[in-house]
Amino acid sequence: MKHHILAVDIGNTNTVFGLFDDNDDFEIQKNWRTVTRRDRTSDELGIFLLGFLQSSGIDPAAIKGFIYSSVVPSFNPIVERMAGDYFRSLAFCVRHDNIPLTIDYPRPEEIGADRLVNAVAGNTIYPGSQIIVDLGTATTFCIVNDGHYIGGSIAPGLKLSMEALFRNTAQLFPVEFSRPPCGVIADTTRHAIQSGFFFGWVGLLRGILSEIHKAYPDQKYQNIATGGLAAMIHREVPELFDTVDPMLTLRGLKIIYKAGKSGGSISH
């Protein structure tokens, strides 16, 4: 029987599951997404995940390892209990002190696990130095200089900002994030909102990336983007990012799992 490993990325908005073979490449075989519900029990989560596996024809007995990263600490015990009860696996939790990356940061324990996982993936898969942009609940920028994580920036998330605008204004209404056909000068309220968010966010991304490049003029960076809206922005403004990798976080979890296994820090 082929052995599989489960990777789980627990975010503030969504939890993403990835399935990978226990080999040395960076690829994810299957992935699924669900809303992060802090009141969900380990049994609910386990049954939910079993349904995903069975719908894809995966025998749960083939799961031989489990790794997760989390920015929702209260959810961690639920995931760990689920891994033990349903997959007989000891869940490997990503921390700043168990990843294959040098961290040059005064308080590494403050760095979000998702940012660390992205940095490991960027550093391993893409040669040289990287600026990794994750357009999630927050918009994060992580800088890796020749294998050293040195810091970054955190801005509000796009969807969060849009929701805040609609929630706190009486006459503005929800719209889809997209580049309006009229361009930056809008001809309707719908297009005005789309224009402000699209060009405003492109400006935010371009501005912060530019400042990082100016701060390290001797470094040649690859701008790598991940997160739900990265591909759409890249289609419209292709010069912003060198690469869009929607599976970056899950691929990073696989890399960390393999590094931990080879180092003897993971047991089943």
Image: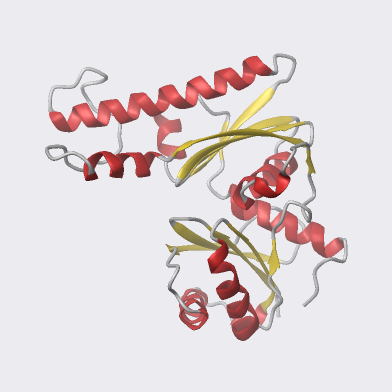
- Residue 30, position as x, y percentages in the image: 55, 63
- The quadrant the C terminus occupies is bottom right
In the rendered view, how is the structure colored?
Answer: secondary structure
- Residue 235, position as x, y percentages in the image: 42, 31
- Residue 254 makes an appearance in the image: yes
**Of residues 203 and 239, which is closer to you in this image?**
203
**Of residues 141 and 247, which is closer to you in this image?**
141
Q: Residue at x 12, y 37 (%)?
A: 171
**Of residues 104 and 101, which is closer to you in this image?**
104
Q: Residue at x 68, y 40 (%)?
A: 122
Residue 213 located left or right of residue 33: right
- Residue 238 makes an appearance in the image: no
**Total labels drawn:** 0
- Residue 132, position as x, y percentages in the image: 60, 36
Q: Residue at x 74, y 56 (%)?
A: 256
Residue at the outermost front position: 107
Q: Is residue 110 above or below residue 98?
A: above
Q: Is residue 62 above or below residue 188?
A: below
The quadrant where residue 185 appears: top left
- The quadrant the N terminus occupies is bottom right
- Residue 102, position as x, y percentages in the image: 81, 41
Q: Is residue 92 above or below residue 145?
A: below
Residue 60 located left or right of residue 266: left
Residue 159 located left or right of residue 17: left
Residue at the outermost right position: 263
